[in-house]
Image: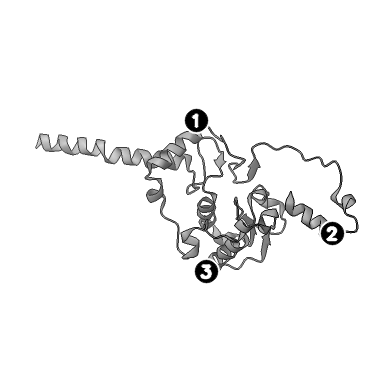
């Protein structure tokens, strides 16, 4: 009997405890925003922000009456600046119009009808990549819930990422999210144009538009 108990204890220590340790570590850093983000530093990387933002949105989806769609530039917009509404910023890197349409259908399938929807159209929207839907989450396309936290965080790859976020908080990230999930540029350099575009093309808006597409 004693040998059996010793076997059970050893088995639990070598299997169950490591599994829960992996889940606990990932849940503490929380790169996919299941539990309110990074408890270690309060800095949340723009890692797999599509699924991370979906997880965050679903926690209190019914409390938003405004949705913001856009690319990485729009991701740094402070949604609280839009007065009279509680907006959720659903912007992410390489976001495009077709993708936003699928997200809108997903939100509608939840029974939600936001009174205000803002769609940012940037230069990327006029490129061939902008019509792709290859980055769209399977959950969004199939109108289903994301995988559970335990299922997602029981991963050694996720554990490595969580460890990197502790030792190298924002390495390689152009922007990140603070503890309130507001987008912040990693390096914000003020843009100081030498000449106004309006001055360059005061009477020729078509050439102005073509110029902007080439920037």
Name the residue that disc number 2 marks.
205
- Residue shown at 85%/41% (left/top)? 194
- Residue shown at 54%/57% (left/top)? 60
- In three-dimensional space, the C-alpha distance between marks 1 and 3, rounded to whole angstroms, equals 40 Å
Q: Nearer the viewer, residue 211 or 193?
A: 211
The residue tagged with tag 2: helix, strand or loop?
Answer: helix
| Residue 121 location (% of width, % of height) | 69, 58
Which residue is farthest top? 167
Q: Nearer the viewer, residue 9 or 172?
A: 172
Name the residue that disc number 3 marks.
109
Query: Contact (CB < 8 A) between labels 1 and 3?
Result: no
| Residue 43 location (% of width, % of height) | 56, 38
Q: Nearer the viewer, residue 107 or 71?
A: 71
Residue 160 relative to residue 72: left or right: left
- In three-dimensional space, the C-alpha distance between marks 3 and 2, rounded to whole angstroms, equals 41 Å
Please say if 34 is above or below 21.
Answer: below
């Amino acid at each position: 009997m004693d040998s059996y108990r010793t076997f059970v204890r050893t088995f639990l220590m070598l299997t169950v405890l490591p599994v829960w340790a992996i889940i606990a570590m990932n849940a503490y850093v929380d790169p996919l925003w299941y539990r309110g983000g990074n408890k270690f530093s309060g800095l949340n990387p723009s890692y797999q922000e599509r699924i991370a933002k979906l997880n965050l949105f679903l926690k209190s989806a019914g409390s938003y009456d405004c949705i913001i769609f856009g690319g990485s530039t729009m991701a740094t917009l402070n949604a609280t600046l839009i007065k009279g509404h509680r907006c959720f910023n659903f912007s992410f890197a390489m976001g495009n119009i077709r993708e936003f349409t699928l997200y809108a259908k997903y939100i509608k399938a939840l029974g939600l009808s936001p009174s205000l929807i803002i769609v940012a159209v940037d230069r990327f929207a006029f490129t061939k990549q902008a019509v792709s839907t290859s980055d769209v989450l399977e959950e969004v396309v199939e109108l289903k819930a994301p995988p559970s936290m335990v299922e997602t965080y029981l991963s050694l790859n996720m554990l490595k990422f969580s460890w990197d976020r502790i030792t190298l908080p924002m390495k390689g990230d152009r922007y990140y999210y603070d503890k309130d999930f507001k987008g912040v540029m990693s390096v914000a350099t003020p843009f100081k144009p030498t000449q106004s575009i309006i001055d360059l093309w005061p009477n020729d808006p078509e050439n102005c538009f073509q110029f902007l597409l080439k920037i």
